[in-house]
Image: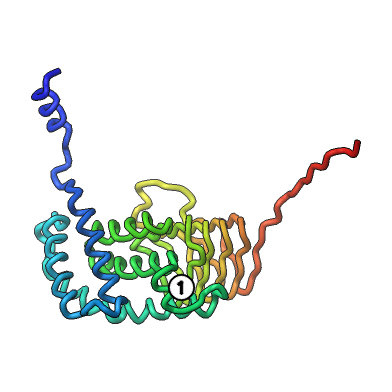
Amino acid sequence: MDRQSVIERINKHKKQPNLRFALKEKVEAFTNHLFYTLFDIDTPVDENLNLLEREFDVLVQLACWEVEKPCKNLWENYVIKLPGVLESLNLDAEAIVNCDPASLSIEEVYMAYPGFYAIAIYRLAHELYEVGFPLVPRLMTEYAHQKTGVDINPGARIGKSFFIDHATGVVVGETAIIKDNVKIYQGVTLGAHYVAKNLQKTKRHPTIEDNVTIYANATILGGKTIIGENSVIGGNAWITSSVPAHSTVFHTPEIKIKTLPHV
């Protein structure tokens, strides 16, 4: 097969007219600039907002495929939400400082805690998701997933003072609801019982009420599953039905220790 034949066959099978990987790279740059604008003391807010608007215009050109939707107006609606997002993120950072004895300063949280970074990008992405611009927020949270190991779908609804400790391996599904003052550890999954395309518009993921702590590697599944307020879910628990408020749920492992016989 000659070179021209290879080119023709590849072009024949490139079937997605809107698939431009430049969008992914530009979303990552936009996400970084957003984070710096909100938190870095040396980054001028006014100057960076102008930069962000220009970058957002490019994202709209690349990702707004349905011409009847007014994507151009999204920036004006989005930028006015940023102060509220920053206020929520400051509460998240304060929750980490107050809960984690290993935390030495709030600056450490902003710069070194992967759980905080994942929450920050989720909150910034969620506002775009809410206005019906789904691909860019999905790419934003996937960027955070790559950097932190935390996979939070931008459609999830998360309340105030959220804390993910150690972070890696956490999964929060699209229709999950997490209320205020919730703390979760590494490896926690808030998922669905099973996956089927016809469930796309239904609530598939659990609801976590106020003041719940979920320890490492617990799995909580199902759209009708509610973890009642002030409950503690122990490590490695597997939950597919609701738990009343003020409950403690734990998994008891079977541990067998084999000892060598004395000679």
Badge 1 element: loop
Q: Residue furthest top?
A: 1
Residue at x-position 27% and y-position 61%: 137
Residue 240: quadrant of the picture? bottom right
Three-letter amino acid code of the residue under disc 1: Phe
Counting every numbered tag in the picture gives 1
Q: Which residue is mark 1?
A: 162
Visible in this render: residue 1? yes
> Quick one: label 1, few (<14), some, or many (20+) residues within 10 Å?
many
Is 107 on the left or on the right of 20, as rendered? right
Is 134 on the left or on the right of 6, as rendered? right
Is 35 on the left or on the right of 52, as rendered? right
Q: x%, y% of residue 56?
A: 16, 65
Visible in this render: residue 160? no
Q: Nearer the viewer, residue 174 or 135?
A: 135
94 lies above or below 239: below
Q: x%, y% of residue 26?
A: 20, 58
Residue at x-position 63% and y-position 63%: 234
The C terminus sits in image quarter: top right
Q: Nearer the viewer, residue 206 or 26?
A: 26
Q: x%, y% of residue 173?
A: 41, 58
Q: x%, y% of residue 118?
A: 39, 64
The N terminus sits in image quarter: top left
Is 34 on the left or on the right of 14, as rendered? right
Residue 6: quadrant of the picture? top left
